[in-house]
Amino acid sequence: MEEQQTQAIPVQLPNGTVIHVQATLLGGEEQVSAHLPTFDEVGHAIEGIAHVLVTSLERVKPRKTCVELGIEIALESGKLTALLVRGSSTANIKVTLEWGSE
């Protein structure tokens, strides 16, 4: 099994703040282009996953639900992308979503 390469890359958040993200390089070596990648695609991926989960949960109507997502950040063609990972120990972002009535 080929070991995946990671690289710390600068990323611009919507508020203009620049952070460094440890990203998995997909498809071999990739250079970060002159412009900073944004975190928007990762946010859109989390929103999309949450939307699908909410739709399903609204159908089954549990009293309380907690969903944990392990998200790993990857760089593909100069853009950030989110990878849904099996183990949260390798995740760059751990997202916990909860629904319920108290």
Image (cartoon, helix red, strand yellow):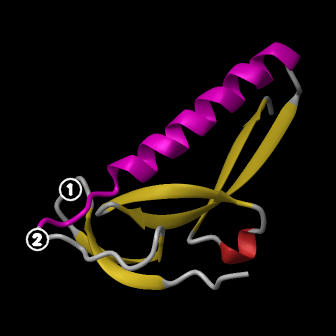
In the displayed orientation, state which residue is furthest to the left: 34
Magenta-tinted stretch:
35-60
Q: Position of residue 15 (x, y in %)?
A: 20, 56
C-beta proximity under 8 Å, tags 1 and 2: no
Q: Secondary structure at mark 1?
A: loop
Q: Main secondary structure of the magenta part?
A: helix
Q: Is 82 left or right of 61, judged from the image as shown?
A: left
Q: Give me the residue at 48% from left, 83% from top.
A: 6
Q: Position of residue 88 (x, y in %)?
A: 73, 69
Q: Give me the residue at 78% from left, 24% from top.
A: 57
- Rate crowding at label 1 as few (under 14), some (14 to 19) or many (20 or more) other CA atoms within 10 Å: few
Q: Give me the residue at 46% from left, 68% from top.
A: 27
- The residue at which mark 1 appears reads as 15
Where, quadrant-wise, is the N terminus in this rendering?
bottom right
Q: Position of residue 38 (x, y in %)?
A: 27, 58
Q: CA distance from mark 1 to mark 2?
A: 19 Å
In the picture, residue 72 is in which quadrant? bottom right
Q: Give me the residue at 33% from left, 75% from top.
A: 30
Say above or below: 101 vs 14. Answer: above
> Per the image, is 58 magenta?
yes
Eye-nearest disc, 1 or 2? 2
How many marks overall? 2
Question: Residue type at mark 2?
Answer: Ala
Label located before the other in sequence (1 or 2): 1
> Per the image, is 36 magenta?
yes
